Every structure is written in C-alpha cells, then in structure tokens.
Amino acid sequence: MSGCCDHETEFDGTSIAFRRALWAVIAINAALFLVEMLAGAAAQSQALKADALDFAADAATYGLSLFVIGKPALWRANAALVKAASLFVMGAVILCLAIWRAFFAAQPDAELMGGIALLALAANVASVLILVRWRNGDANVRSVWLCSRNDAIGNLAVIGSAGLVAWTGTHWPDVIVAGLMAGLFVSSAVQILGKALAERRQARHGRAPDGQAPGETCQSH
C-alpha cells in the first residue's frame, strides 16, 4: 500500500523484549561498576576507574531509558539530552583524572588491570549481543546501543593498555587510554545530542518523523 506506510518510523522502545533486555544490561552494568571501581583502586589504574564510571553511567542511562519508554516523544528526547549531558560530564571527569594521573600517580598493576578488563569485556559483549537487535531507533534507543558499544571498545582499550604498561614499565599507556575513552564519551554525546535535539524540535512543533503529518500513523492491512 502506498502512502505513509512507505515511511518506516523509528523504534521507540515500546516492546516487552526490549524492556527485558534493558533490565538484563542494568544488572550487568551495576555489578561490573562495583567490581571495576574496587579493582581500579587496588590496581591504581585510571583506565579501570574510567571504565567503572562508564558502567555506572550506563546503568543509570538504561534506567532512564526504561522510565521514558511509552512516554511522549518530548519526554524521550529530553531523556536523551540528559544522557548526552552525562556523557559530556563523564568525558570531562575522565580527562581530568587522566591529566592528574600523568603527573602524580604511580605505575598501575598491569596483571590486575588485564584480568578485570577481560571480565568486563565478557560482560559488555553479553550486553552488546542482548541489545544488538535494537541498535537503531530514536535518540533514547540509540543512546542505549552507543553506551553498550562504548563499553566493549573501552574494555578492549584497557586490555591493550595493561599489556603496554607491562611492556613499557610506565603508566603512560594507562593515561593515554583514559584520554581516548574520554574522547569516545564526547563523540557519543555529540551523536545523541544531535539526534535528540532534532526529535525535540519535531515534538515541540507537532511534526511526526519521516514526513508524516501530526497524528498520522501507519496501519497494517
């Protein structure tokens, strides 16, 4: 059938399967935040602490995503803006900690860094596999995928950092990886911010995405 149904609307998270997936990754991220923060303190690793903060931010992000599922588009867009802001803040905090570590901290425990990073990587791969079906969608759904993807990339970086710390005998690889992770946070924040602002403008002006008129919906036949 021609007409509005030629335009595919973005997934807004309203499905039981997506809600269950979010609960699963919330549990995974909350548990790994505690593990990595304790391990980061023990290993004196700024990269591990940065990754632990990422887990905490993700758990909060997923909780916010659950809360706004089924809410009006403006609510979901505003929630995505909050997530973008939190990613900017996290990136700034991680960068500041990395700078501090560059001048005032000792060499981290590479063996403990690598072991915990492997555990975190396994958890993040599990989260990515759980969420891969919903990697595309509105700003709220998209932010969930980006956070999970960032975690997996961050863990790979920490593993590489641990190897370089052991090989070079210095703390600089740990500092550099923390800085790169800060950049990844900011990059994701920019992506979410742009999408959320566009959806917010559409919601405020009563416009539906993909060229639909306000209130127009596609019906299956």
Image (tube, grey):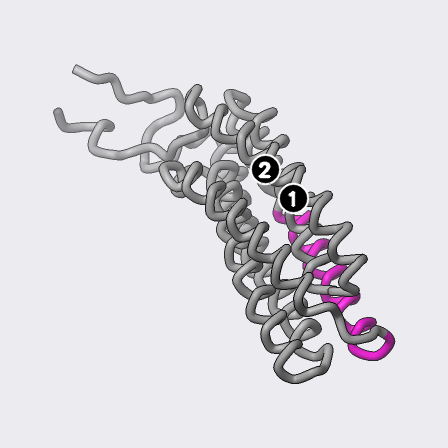
Q: Label 1, secondary structure: give it.
A: helix
Q: Position of residue 63 (x, y in %)?
A: 62, 31
The extreme top residue here reads: 221
CA gap, disc 2 to disc 1?
Answer: 6 Å
In the image, residue 161 lies at what x, y percent?
Answer: 61, 71
Residue at the image position 51 percent from the left and 48 percent from the top: 122
Q: Which residue is mark 2?
A: 28
Percent across and percent down for residue 218 are 27, 22
- Segment tinted magenta in the rendering: 84-104
Q: Which amino acid type corresponds to the residue marked 1 in the rendered image? A: Leu
**Which quadrant of the rendered structure holds the N terminus?**
top left
Q: Which mark is residue 93?
A: none
Q: Residue furthest right?
A: 104
Does residue 18 appear left or right of residue 4 in this picture?
Answer: right
Which element carries disc 2, helix, strand or loop? helix
Circles 2, 1 touching at the beta carbon (< 8 Å): yes
Tag 2: amino acid: Ile
Mark 1 residue crowding within 10 angstroms, few (<14) / some (14–19) / many (20+): many
Chief secondary structure of the magenta portion: helix
- Which residue is pictured at 75% across the width and 57% down the height? 40
Question: Among all residues in the image, which is located at the extreme left?
Answer: 1
User: Would you say 38 lies left or right of 84 here?
Assistant: right
Q: Which residue is mark 1?
A: 32
